[in-house]
């Protein structure tokens, strides 16, 4: 998808690029090299970048949330619920996040479809079929987590008493639903704004430092943290 869009964009002789992917096809890399224009990559501050990057440490964000869930005292370790789209450009930030989740979580489930509330419903159904003792879930996206929460409510499961649920990115719906969704809040708007400012500076020929800017993240507890020590 990125490659096709890039081919179209470069035909307009653009002066710079902002990308949200970090893993690119060989053809994409070649097109960017030939274009010789400044490139800003968003969403990740740790993986090697083509030019300059603005993001956060996905690996550490997933580790901290998973550690917090485990510290709550959940009997069965939370699963990582994620979506695989089978595309070559599936970016490294999701891979890093899944690695941390799977390293700390006892179980994992996956569906071959795009991230949505419906996908979250299917994921929690699949997880409960495969692991009936499950009492916690950490999703790679808030869409999935919200869908999982809706399904738990439909089944009469109390969140977080019967099923602790955490998501990623801090989407607005998760922060206004009841109970409020635990999530990793990521500075997406700041990333876009700062990324654009840094790209314009590069286009003007100005020096931009540091090459990789880490904007950090925040853990939003929602109602997953019930233990006094958290």
Image: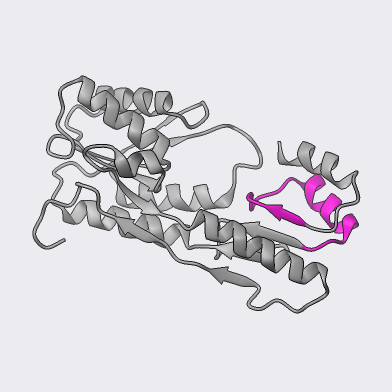
What residue appears at the point 32 percent right and 45 percent down from the top-left corner?
175
Residue 138 at x, y percent in the picture: 32, 43
Q: Please check the rendered image and state whether residue 22 is part of the magenta-colored stretch, yes or no.
A: yes
Residue 80 visible here: no
For this orientation, the residue located farthest to the left is 228
Residue 119, how many percent across, how many down?
42, 26
**Colour scheme of this structure image?**
one colour
Q: Which residues are magenta?
A: 17-38
At x 63%, y 35%, the residue is 87
Q: Residue at x 37, y 23 (%)?
A: 122
Q: Nearer the viewer, residue 178 or 153?
A: 178
Q: Is residue 72 above or below residue 123?
A: below
Q: Position of residue 2 (x, y in %)?
A: 72, 41
* Left or right, residue 106 beside residue 58: left
Q: Residue at x 75, y 71 (%)?
A: 201
The quarter of the displayed image where residue 25 is located? top right
Q: Is 70 displayed left or right of 114 in the figure?
A: left
Mark count: 0
User: Looking at the rendering, in which quadrant would you find the C terminus?
Assistant: bottom left
Could you say which is closer to the camera, residue 176 or residue 71? 176
Q: Is residue 225 magenta?
A: no
Q: Is residue 8 above or below residue 14?
A: above
Q: Residue 181: x, y in percent?
A: 28, 43
């Amino acid at each position: 998808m990125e490659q096709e869009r890039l081919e179209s964009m470069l035909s307009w002789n653009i002066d710079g690029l902002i990308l949200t992917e970090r893993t690119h096809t060989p053809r994409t890399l070649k097109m960017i090299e030939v274009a010789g224009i400044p490139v800003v990559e968003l969403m990740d501050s740790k993986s090697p970048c083509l030019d300059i990057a603005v993001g956060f440490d996905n690996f550490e964000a997933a580790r901290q949330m998973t550690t917090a869930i485990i510290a709550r005292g959940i009997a069965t370790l939370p699963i990582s619920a994620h979506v695989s789209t089978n595309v070559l450009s599936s970016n490294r930030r999701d891979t890093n996040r899944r690695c941390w989740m799977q390293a700390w979580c006892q179980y994992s489930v996956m569906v071959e479809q795009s991230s949505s509330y419906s996908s979250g419903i299917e994921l929690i159904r699949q997880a409960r079929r495969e692991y009936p003792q499950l009492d916690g879930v950490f999703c790679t996206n808030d869409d999935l987590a919200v869908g999982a929460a809706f399904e738990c409510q439909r089944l009469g499961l109390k969140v977080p008493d019967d099923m602790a649920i955490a998501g990623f990115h801090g989407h607005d719906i998760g922060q206004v639903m009841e109970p409020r969704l635990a999530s990793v809040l990521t500075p997406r708007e700041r990333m876009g704004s700062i990324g654009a400012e840094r790209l314009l500076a590069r286009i003007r020929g100005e020096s931009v430092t540091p090459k990789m800017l880490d904007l950090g993240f925040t853990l939003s507890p929602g109602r997953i943290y019930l233990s006094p020590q958290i």
